[in-house]
Image: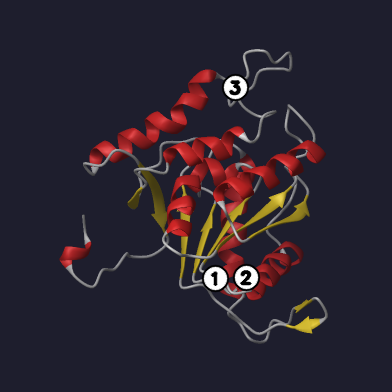
Amino acid sequence: MKLDILAFGAHPDDVELGCGATIAKEIDLGKKVGIVDLTRGELGTRGSAEIREEEASAAATILGVQIRENLGFRDGFFVNDEKHQLEIIKMIRKYRPEIVLCNAIDDRHIDHGKGSKLVSDACFLSGLRKIETVCNGQLQTEWRPKVVYHYIQWRNIEPDFVVDVTGYIEKKVESVLAYGTQFYDKNSTEPSTPITSKNFLDSITYRAKDLGRLINKDFAEGFTAERYLAVNSLEDLI
């Protein structure tokens, strides 16, 4: 299956938190979008890998993505090496996306920065024809996405561009709340973490609202780019 956009996250819920509204909007615009999670999030303080898998499936249904896969890398301990790069290359060649979205380049959780560089490096290597990969018994051909963009996560990194997601923030929040074990629940008796506070849950909306304010829209999501952004005309800028 050929996808327009393939979004990678180090953990299930990274994609929803980082760019869920953008994905929902692109799907409404007719784009085919998929998600690949690098780990099962098994080191998460709350819940379990099995529960997280169910939550990820529910979130994918809410967003309406075409596919969601999990590579099963070790949460907290995966590295950027040939073994891991090849698994990501297989995904890129399998779905042949024009655009790849991935973790923030620098963030509070060590897996986010690692995952960001791992996916970015694999996107480049995927375009080298002498790297051979096999998927479902078939030899794959090379494929390099046109662009790699990094969504913003815990840290308030200055975005290189923002996407107007007015009308889609509610669906983003709904997809995040599909992870019932991970976020604010006033009745929960499990340990508290930085992402289980009500303030963190509220930040999904107020951070998007603040980025929207800066472009004279209601809501926006920010991204960083690895190379210069280009437009055909000044009229392309809003």
Q: In the displayed structure, would residue 191 be above or below residue 121?
A: above
Disc 3 target residue: 184
Q: Who's the residue at 66% across and 70% down the image?
A: 89
Mark 1 and mark 2 in contact? Answer it, CB < 8 Å.
yes
Q: Earlier in the sequence, mark 1 or mark 2?
A: 2
Q: CA distance from mark 1 to mark 3?
A: 34 Å
Classify mark 2: helix, strand or loop. helix
Classify mark 3: helix, strand or loop. loop
Disc 1 target residue: 97
Task: Choose top left, top right, bottom left or bottom right for residue 218.
Answer: top left
Residue 81: percent from left, percent from top = 71, 62
Residue depth check, mark 3 versus mark 2: number of the one nearer the observer: 3
The crowd level at tag 3 (other Cα within 10 Å; few <14, some 14-19, many 20+) is many
Q: At label 1, which amino acid type do we have?
A: Pro
Q: Earlier in the sequence, mark 1 or mark 3?
A: 1
Q: At label 3, which amino acid type do we have?
A: Tyr
- Nearest to the observer: residue 220 or residue 90: 220
Disc 2 target residue: 92
